[in-house]
Amino acid sequence: MLDYTLIKEELNQRMEPKLYIHSLSAAQTAKELAAHYEFDEEQAYCAALLHDYAKAIKNEDLLQIAWENDLLSNTVENEMPHLLHAPVGAYLAQLHYNVDNPEILQAISYHTLGGLDMSILSKIVYLADKIEPGRRHPESRQLREISYKGLDEAMLYSLESTIINCIVKKSIIHPRTIIVYNHFLRIIRNK
């Protein structure tokens, strides 16, 4: 059993206030989503609380940790090292807090790009990160509604929104985002 009081104190010390509040809110949102889908609320809370554990780490340090621990999945991450806060966060959660539940570690690792083998927990944390009440993106309200109707539908909507936002901003799109989008599109089409 993790000591959430200690974890919150440490997160509060290492994060900017806005990020700390986001982590607390995402954890509560994940707990609520888990309850809605009759999933383990504590696992959802834990994974969402720790999902941005590595976000305060500088890009060059994220890259170094990723290189040293074989956490890079694509060369795009060299250009966009901020994306590495997810797999590095999972690695550090295991290292610093002895988190050994593979589903929790996967949920932390997949919360930015998703994955083809996402568990229910991974989907819950991915979506909680996007729909927690502090998020004010135009698509957040619609995504909140969809998230309580179906996890796969919400994943598809969120990935589609991400791709559109990247195109509008002329940002590089991580190839895994496209692959995961296609995966959820096939799931929805086959329902």
Image: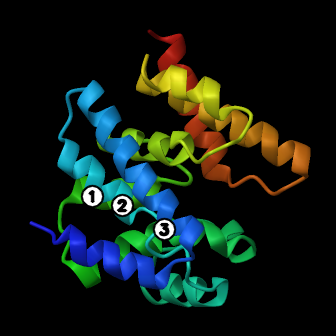
Q: Quadrant of the C terminus?
A: top left
Q: Amino acid at mark 2?
A: Leu
Q: Secondary structure at mark 1?
A: helix
Residue at image coords 16%, 72%: 3
Q: Are marks 2 and 1 in contact (CB under 8 Å)?
A: yes
Q: Report the residue marked by disc 3.
A: 20
Residue 115 appears in the rendering: no
First-in-chain label (1 vs 3): 3
Mark-to-mark CA distance, 2 and 3? 9 Å
**Going by the image, does 135 lie left or right of 1?**
right
Along the line of sight, the residue nearer the viewer: 40 or 74: 40
Q: Is residue 142 above or below residue 103?
A: above
Q: Report the residue marked by disc 1.
A: 46
Q: Report the residue marked by disc 2.
A: 49
Where is residue 146 drawn, in percent x and y?
52, 21
Q: Quadrant of residue 70?
A: bottom left
Q: Quadrant of the N terminus?
A: bottom left
Q: Amino acid at mark 3?
A: Tyr
**Going by the image, does 187 lie left or right of 168?**
left
First-in-chain label (2 vs 3): 3
Residue at image coords 61%, 35%: 158
**Going by the image, does 101 lie left or right of 79?**
left
Residue at image coords 57%, 76%: 16
